Amino acid sequence: MSRLTIPEPEIELYKDGFKPHATGKLHDQLGREPTGKALSDLVDRIAEPMVIALDGGWVSGKSFFLKCWVGEHLKREQNTTQTVYFDAFKHDFIDEPLISLMGVIEDRFEDEDVKDKTWKKRFAGTVSVAKRLLKPTLRIGAAVGTGMASEVAIAAIGTEKIDTVVDGAIDAGLKGIGAEASAAVDELWKSEAGRRQAMTEFRKSLIALTEPVKEKPAEAEDEAAKTPDEQKPRHRKLVIVVDELDRCRPDYALSLLELIKHFFDVPHVHFVLGVNMRELENSVKARYGGGINAGLYLQKFVTLTMGLPTTTNAFEGKSLSTSYFERNSARVGINQAQHEYILGVLDTVIDKESLTLRAIQRLIALLQITTLPDMSFQDELLEKVAASSLSILRVIRPQTYKDIHTGKIDLVELQLIFEMSAEGHRRANRLLFDCWQLFLQPAEYTKRMGYTLDTAPSAEDQFKRIHQLKMRHLEVFELRGSL
């Protein structure tokens, strides 16, 4: 059965990693395990809180990488880190991000796979504190994030009674009664003392959560043989992966960043954001206006940014996109002949950066709704190569594709897009040059091949032939939509 899109691999969170799990199927088709190891080394080595932005465009494989990574990291020898995967986009219908985030973390710690009872016991305390913050947290995030909250005197309440008032107000609110108590806590949370108390208690609970692991007493000789780093106590760590942040509503995405900065800023607690930084900057501008320096604003929240590699030694230096097509075209039903011609032309594309995973997915969808010629004589062979290169142009250079049948294209321009020449070392380079010289410079082509034409076709006739080729094979349907 043919498919229009490449099927997503089924990943069992926290169990599957980059390598095969119970099914024996290889998840890591992009060779990104070394990048995962580098990320694990970083979060294990650094104690101070970090927010790491894994930056990449849509359909760059960020979500796939992060879903594999949260399970792979748990497999590390003597691991003391707990990972949590949070899909922000699935939860942005809830106005208060702390509710959804703590819910996902709580579910993770209640999982039977988390064997460490100390983790579970300490996290129960963290949840208890967090639940007391849920009602007023949205106002806290806005006040702390903008620094514009008005100060309200709370002498009548007293800071030593903050806990009692907050608990009573929330309990009353849940029962639908107690408007007076609820109003009191609203006033309290507008004050500096209320915000400070809330953040202090929550941070203390996180610090308790990540206290060092109690090790069995070591013999003196064994302890002396360790390096200074090995002799240091091993802290528990919490790494929360927040994925799809750039797809969220701007107010939700930025409230979540403010929450991370002001409530989770404690040692041994790290965040990894799966995000398209350019889109996140657009969210900042949508919230605060186009005049803000969005990149500078986001530096307040992000410690460092890393990207996913576009090449890897796992595929002998090939681009990930070319390898992605090679590994997946058969899975969606593209026949071997189409596969070979497309793959050959892909290897000649000069600007490898244009061959994103999204571009490859669009190319595969295009090939599924159109056809390539299936003849095998010399001129028809060149027609196959031409149709293959046209399909790639349609995806990565749509304006060039439109210009071809209007006479606004020449061989030199195409040679800036594809690596091709009559003396090319690879067959694909030579065939590509032959086909486009035949279409665009027929007299030169026939002369080079050792024969002449009685009547050389006009440029108009040649472009008409290319247009017919497009109509016959590539323009039965228009390729639009979100692929």
Image (tube, rainbow, N blue to C red):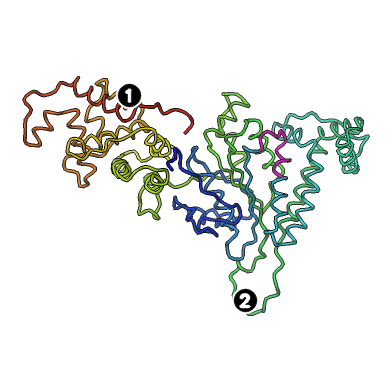
Q: Amino acid at mark 2?
A: Ala
Residue at image x 34%, y 38%?
Answer: 351
Q: What is the magenta range?
A: 91-102
In the rendered image, residue 246, in percent from the top left (x then y), is placed at: 57, 35
Quarter holding residue 192: top right
In the rendered image, residue 155, in percent from the top left (x then y), is placed at: 91, 35
- Identify residue for label 1: 402
Closer to the camera, 222 or 27? Answer: 27
In the rendered structure, the answer to whether residue 197 lies left or right of residue 281 reads right
Q: Amino acid at mark 1?
A: Lys
Quarter holding residue 446: top left
Residue at image x 40%, y 26%?
Answer: 478
* Residue count near mark 2 (Cα–Cα under 10 Å), binned few <14, some 14–19, many ≥20: few
- Identify residue for label 2: 224
Which quadrant, please, contains the N terminus?
top left
In the rendered image, residue 84, in percent from the top left (x then y), is placed at: 64, 50
